[in-house]
Image (tube, rainbow, N blue to C red):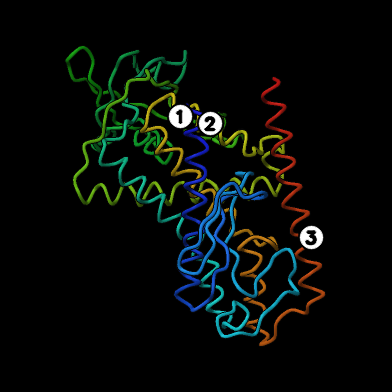
Amino acid sequence: MSWLVSLLVLSALIFFHELGHYAAARLMGVYVEVFSIGFGKKLASFHAWGTQWSISAIPLGGYVKMKGQDDSDPSNVSTDNDSYNTKTPLQRIFILLAGPAANFALAFVLYFFIALGGPSVLSPVIGQVVKDSPAFVAGLEGNDTIRSINAIPVTTWKDMAKIIASSEGSLNVEIERAGFIEYKTITPKFSETQNMYGETVQRKMIGIGAAGVSHKLDLGFFETFSYATEQTIFASTLIFTGVQKLISGDVPAKELGGVISIVKLTSDATDAGWMSVLFFAALISVNLGVLNLLPIPALDGGHIMFNIYELITKRAPSEAVLINLTIAGWVILFSLMGLGLYNDVNRLMG
């Protein structure tokens, strides 16, 4: 059942991405010939609003086929008024951006519903204290709850860690222990740790670990909007940075995952509850938006690059350049998909 939910979630995210392209194309007067979820042999299809809507056998993506626009044959153009080719570069860029924009908008909506349900966050309750660390020297103990730092109220472990990491000098820490309030003075020191990308970094720390206690956030209406906005921006930044580090080699290529990883992680999230599914769906939706903006021919970002070139130079790239770059783009794309699949199989086999 969880694997079925995984495929449905992935298909829904692809659907919203392509729906963004579809809506923008129709708004710009472009005729959309096919709207497909998946590739390959058509399993089911119907005609509506002049478009063939299809579900295909290979659920690894989807596409909107617009009149005069064909990634498999860039030379296949049309000069009709309802063709993609006859639109201005700005109109085409608008159509191309609409897909990723739909993914970011969907992620915002998902985070909004998560906020309405009261997302769980890690409480600032100490689980362990590292021996001879600043916290150990100051007398902090397991099960202590940090209530404030330098008179700034602390309600989550994440907020507490941010304050410590950006601190200057000693900290006045208010803790609750067995129902009583105590005050400690702690001077953080730089220590080696690993960030979320697996890199070893130096960070100001006091030497404590979380007890694993969590609580639900009780958010008001405007706080809910703020939460959804912050989470969408955070997820986007996280994925943009991850891609940058993967390209620069700071993150090894073996960390790249493919569709099997996505389905498995979504399946695991399903087992953990619907709130986890919404979290993961929002993250994957942002991931689709970011990756499609990469300047790789055959992706939205590659087409945007071509249109920006035309906008600046007042002439379209030559047919030969388009064909060669599109072929190169497909090679890169299939290579990345192959690498992700290879890594997925290696992980499954241990």
* Vertical relation: 318 (above or below) 115: below
Looking at the image, residue 317 lies above or below residue 299? below
Which amino acid, by three-letter code, is at mark 3? Answer: Ala
Q: CA distance from mark 2 to mark 1?
A: 6 Å
Residue topped by disc 3: 328
Q: Amino acid at mark 2?
A: Leu
Q: Residues within 10 Å of mark 1 (few under 14, many from 20)?
A: many
Mark 3 Cα within 10 Å, few/some/many (few <14, many 20+)?
some
Measure the alpha-carbon separation of dots 1 and 3. 36 Å
Q: Quadrant of the C terminus?
A: top right
Give the structural element (helix, strand or loop) at label 2: helix
Residue 34's spot in the image, x, y percent?
Answer: 57, 63
Q: Nearer the viewer, residue 243 or 204?
A: 243
Q: Is residue 113 left or right of residue 164?
A: left
The residue at which mark 1 appears reads as 269
The residue wearing badge 2 is: 265
Q: Is label 2 in contact with label 1 (beta carbons under 8 Å)? A: yes
